[in-house]
Amino acid sequence: MKIDITDYNHADEILNPQLWKEIEETLLKMPLHVKASDQASKVGSLIFDPVGTNQYIKDELVPKHWKNNIPIPKRFDFLGTDIDFGKRDTLVEVQFSNYPFLLNNTVRSELFHKSNMDIDEEGMKVAIIITKGHMFPASNSTLYYEQAQNQLNSLAEYNVFDVPIRLVGLIEDFETDIDIVSTTYADKRYSRTITKRDTVKGKVIDTNTPNTRRRKRGTIVTY
Amino acid sequence: MKIDITDYNHADEILNPQLWKEIEETLLKMPLHVKASDQASKVGSLIFDPVGTNQYIKDELVPKHWKNNIPIPKRFDFLGTDIDFGKRDTLVEVQFSNYPFLLNNTVRSELFHKSNMDIDEEGMKVAIIITKGHMFPASNSTLYYEQAQNQLNSLAEYNVFDVPIRLVGLIEDFETDIDIVSTTYADKRYSRTITKRDTVKGKVIDTNTPNTRRRKRGTIVTY
DNA sequence: TGGTATAGATCTATAC
DNA sequence: GTGTATAGATCTATAC
């Protein structure tokens, strides 16, 4: 996939280039993962697959010695049980769940940072939050990059947070052939058990082009 | 129900006593609402009913001239579409959804406050956030009062927010007969269409008492 | 009537 | 094997 980045509180200066390279490489070589929706009126249509995407990222980062599901220390247990990924002073959250998680992840990162909590034997210095672009059809109310960007921009304007954050948006070019991993799971909802998986070529259709008036925005076409 | 309160940033001094009285009255005379869970391994067991509770609060506050679903102005549209309730300078969020909404609601209230956004023809001065106590069985990951309290306590300690907030927790006494509204909806999940509703007497069992060892914590018993 | 955007409801997955 | 706690997945409800 392609990525877009927005940095807050000088994340660009603080983020270790080698650590960032490991994250960036992983995301740039990742194919778009899609699955069938089970939402009324759009059953079977292809949407962004958070299960497949999360699994891919985990399978890439863990061999690069990123720790997964790092436990949150007891003194902060009211902020949750664990952090998605971490290496040295860098925390990573991959967030495809509902939109309020953006401010949850941001504020708890702020507290981890203010208290100099250890991530991977080093005090936390910077957070990377990975989201998906608005261009992809997806489950209702799932967080998207542009929404996260607008919210963090506003927080930055009002000086609500000090923690350096690199916000990452996963995107693709519209109307361009891309690699897509299309997965069927054991159940229509929630399941992480793969029943069938195909790697195909496809594209994301942009509604705003004249000849696709009848298609929906961000429709994913595979063939 | 009974309530517990925690105030942040001098909400006690800023909250208009008459407006608070209207909220408090509503909550104190509200019965505990329960419904059947559809979660695997506990299908049919009674859990806190957010649908019924939300509807009750709306039906009480609207006649008291609290505005419901107040639109968020366009300049803040990235923070959402509306606010649950508002009257004059006071904003109310009733939050029984998943836990990240606490920090979402807190931070967006902070921005509304910092920018002096109008609620009901007056600039916002204080937020009231209504939650349910941890004592009640409930859907997984739904926000509860003690969790909200711990999170806001920590934010207050690190001076992350300035907006006055009154956090409210809905509770009941354990092992004590209370009024319970038990509702069946048209579908097992999500529905807001009432099929059957009974007002009964019941109680919330506390696991920690010796003679209830075999019961689960917070079990709601009706009879 | 259908599409969009939350907001809310509430499940499964997973580790302890 | 059971209960608890998130974290994540992802639906329906509702208004525009």
Image: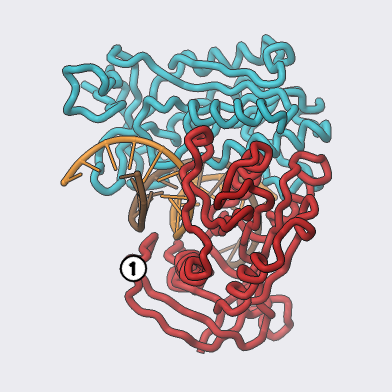
Chain colours: A cyan, B red, C orange, D brown
**Percent position of residue D6, x then y:** 63, 48
Residue B162 quadrant: top right
Q: Is residue A40 above or below residue B212?
A: above
Callout 1 secondary element? loop
Horizontal side of B17 relative to B58 (left or right) equals: right
Report the residue at 63% width, 77% height from top.
B28
Specify the amino acid type for callout 1. Answer: Thr
**Percent position of residue B68, x then y:** 48, 58
Report the residue at 75% width, 30% height from top.
A119
Report the residue at 46% width, 70% height from top.
B59
Q: Is residue A191 above or below residue B24?
A: above
Residue B166 quadrant: bottom right
**In the rendered structure, the residue with mark 1 lies on which chain?**
B
Residue located farthest toward the front when viewing the structure as drawn: B121
Is residue A176 visible in the rendered image? The answer is yes
Report the residue at 33% width, 65% height from top.
B187
Q: Is residue B147 above or below residue A159?
A: below
**Percent position of residue B74, x then y:** 47, 35
Figure label count: 1
**Which residue corresponds to mark 1?**
B193
Location of the N terminus of chain B (image quadrant): bottom right
Residue sitting nearer the eye, D1 or A159:
A159
Is residue A55 visible in the rendered image? The answer is no
**Percent position of residue A139, x then y:** 38, 40
Are there few (<14), some (14-19), or many (20+) residues within 10 Å of tag 1? few
